[in-house]
Image (spheres, rainbow, N blue to C red):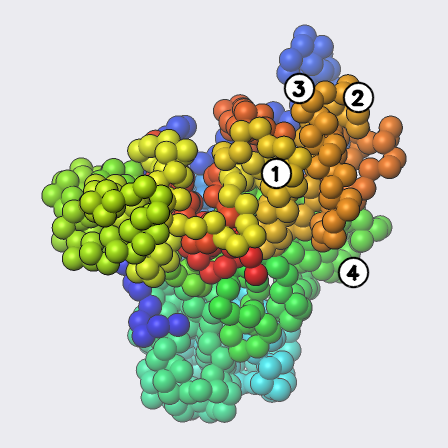
Amino acid sequence: MGERAMSDAEKKTFTDEEALNFHRYPTPGKIGVVATKPMATQRDLSLAYSPGVAVPVLAIAKDPDLAYEYTSKGNLVAVISNGTAILGLGDLGALASKPVMEGKSVLFKRFGDVDSIDIEVTSKDADEIITVVKNIGVTFGGINLEDIKSPECFRIETELQELLDIPVFHDDQHGTAIICAAGLINACHITGKNIQDVKVVLNGPGAAGIASLELIKAMGVRPENVIAVDSKGVLYQGRTEGMNQWKSAHAVDTPLRTLAEAVVGADVLLGLSAKGAFTPEMIASMAPNPVIFAMANPDPEITPEEVHAIRSDAIMGTGRSDYPNQVNNVLGFPYIFRGALDVRARRVNHEMKIACANALAMLAREDVPDEVAAAYHGRQLKFGPQYIIPSAFDPRLIWYVPPFVAQAAMDTGVARKPIADMDAYRANLAQRLDPTAGFLQKISGAVLANPKTIVFAEGEDPSVIRAAYAFQTGGYGKAILCGRENLVQENMRVVGLDPQTAGLEIHNARLSDRNPDYVDALYMRLQRQGYLKRDVQRLINQDRNSFAASMVTLGEADGMVTGVTRSFDQALEEVLRVVDPAPGGRIMGMSVVLAKGRTVFVADTNVTELPDSDELVEIAVEAARAVKRLGFKPRVAFMSYSTFGNPMGERSDKVREAVAMLDEMDVDFEYEGEMPPELALDPEKRANYPFMRLTDSANILIMPAIHSASIATKLVQSLGGATVIGPVLLGLSKPVQIAPLSASVSKILNMAMMAAYEGSGDLAAAE
């Protein structure tokens, strides 16, 4: 875990200007409206608006429930705030909260496939806010209240729950409470403690704190075993200072008056307060096998390092992603609303929240799938003290949690549309999410868990400098820039970085004291290929790819990134002077196409111009190996303009021969061909070909030539609606990635992370 966790400032991977540009370009804001019906003809317009729209209008007027059938109401949530408690920034006003509310809407879509719109209300008066939301509530399937300060938030939520016939959920309260409760369930399971008997101390009875107390009491924690403490001390019966009706509900009959006194002998310590609120002495005074959730952000009440230095028997959780057991609200609200919307629930009750907490607890106990395990190379994720809460990017969450929420709604009578076939519902949920963010997060999560040293060969380029800085400050590892110090530092200033504080290491190939060793090693390699020693000296001194690749081959860096200032072919040729192919590997490029509903790998996109049948087989085997190590089950389709022999042609013959060769081999992946893309990607198109061996849509497309691969990937990227990563270079014995010419900062960073990911062995060509 390291001696010290980096502060948020140290971890910041972007400048203020980059954050502003992200929100400004190419379109201001983070959300938009996309039509779900075609608008291509006059008939389409007539159906969508006048006169066709009158038909559902009249139907809804007769039966309001039909709004769920004929409009977007059933999958639409309003994120509503007045900006009185924005993140940790305080009361900055309704308009200032809009970026946060848009961000919440994005999270709803990303994790729960819930459509969402943000609404900012310019009032601090609880009655006015209640009136506004009551009057617009008919538009939505649910209301998510956000960043409204305590204690007004309690009243606003409670009254709106009574006034509206849809779920009203204040995430600042209940999101934290649900995840905290899930962690407590599993912590008790591990320590053998009965949740009804544990003694709990809460520091910080604000919105989230009080909601946490209410939920764990509903789950069985006895009220007399719970002590809440605010900035003025213990909430005891009879206290009047700083009290309100919500705090008073959790006051207990106790002689204890301070946090330090309350913590003595406690089993559970919950913190929703401020950095440093918990002292080592407090932790030492707790009962055996204590459970500590220090959830203050950005810095917890006490760090896991400090706790474990005192108590080896403690189970620890925080609100931070760089520690195990993150109490992250995104584990809750998308799935609470997904389940609630899908049964048209009238409200979110305690039973639904408890169901969500129990589902999360159970999910953490299950075997971790490859998609998550791949993100933690050195750590085998397994249920235990360091893993009691699921990863927020566990792909199972979308289909695992909502059914429990929906079932609880049905069991408690708040569901208007019960689900008859829960298995079919789970299958439907599993198909909803866009894989793009999940794929990228898996790679970045893996590198965060196992940081590497990456050398950026074209270190004078401003985009490369920014990508290297993002790599290092993002916690992915150490970034080394190759270039002339003066020019690198000058371009650092151009992009807004201070060379003195940026912390990036610069290696000047001409002046490096490692040059003699690099020259000797490379000369031994090239001396029988027509190179004199002075030729090799020039390569090391003047060619940064030779210099950077030498660093990697001699173990002074784990991987390298190049290609931004020169063509792929030129960069690969220069790298191959220094780096060997992997034994049994095939040097090739593989692009990753991420589009809604699927991830497709395309090969070979860069190396072999017109592969023969033998080469097509090698490309397929190499691609399948890499894809399997990325956590996917390989299903290979050989692409062609012909469909199983119709029409015949020279290129299609090569493809047919490759498939026949695989038939004679013992391979551990599905394959089929030759075929056009529609047969590979759409199982419904296969009615005329019942002999096809693919059990599902192909996820690896083997192209018959470079030109078809390159055109296909660039076309889908240019048309929009898809993200293309790569091409990822496979088949080398060392981690080297070649970014596209003039690549953006994000693409360079992606390639650096792929090199670091590869450095752990996941994309290596041989076991």
Q: Is residue 309 visible?
A: yes
Say which residue appears at 63% left-offset and 80% top-offset. Answer: 189
What residue does disc 3 label?
A: 38
Are discs 4 and 3 less than 8 Å apart at CB?
no
- The picture places residue 741, in percent across and down from the top left corner, at 37, 31
- Pick the front one: 68 or 19: 19
Position of residue 542 in the picture relative to residue 558 (left or right): left
Q: Which of 763 and 661 lies nearest the eye of the viewer? A: 661
Residue 266 drawn above or below residue 385? below
Residue 474 at what x, y percent from top left?
35, 54
Distance between the alpha carbons at the discs numbered 4 and 3: 39 Å
Q: Which residue, given by chain and number where applicable, does mark 2 sit on?
A: 646
Callout 4: SS: helix
Q: Image height check: is 279 above or below 38?
A: below
Q: Nearer the viewer, mark 4 or mark 3?
A: 3
Which amino acid does the dot numbered 4 rest on?
Answer: Asp
Task: Name the residue furthest top.
Answer: 42
Please provide percent x and percent y for residue 128.
46, 43
Residue 615 - label: 1
Q: Kindly state the secondary structure of the residue where label 3 is placed.
A: loop
Q: Residue at x 67, y 68 (%)?
A: 366
Per the model, the C-alpha gap separating discs 1 and 2 is 23 Å
Question: Which of pointers 4 and 3 lies earlier in the amino acid sequence?
Answer: 3
> Image point 51% across, 39% down: which residue?
589
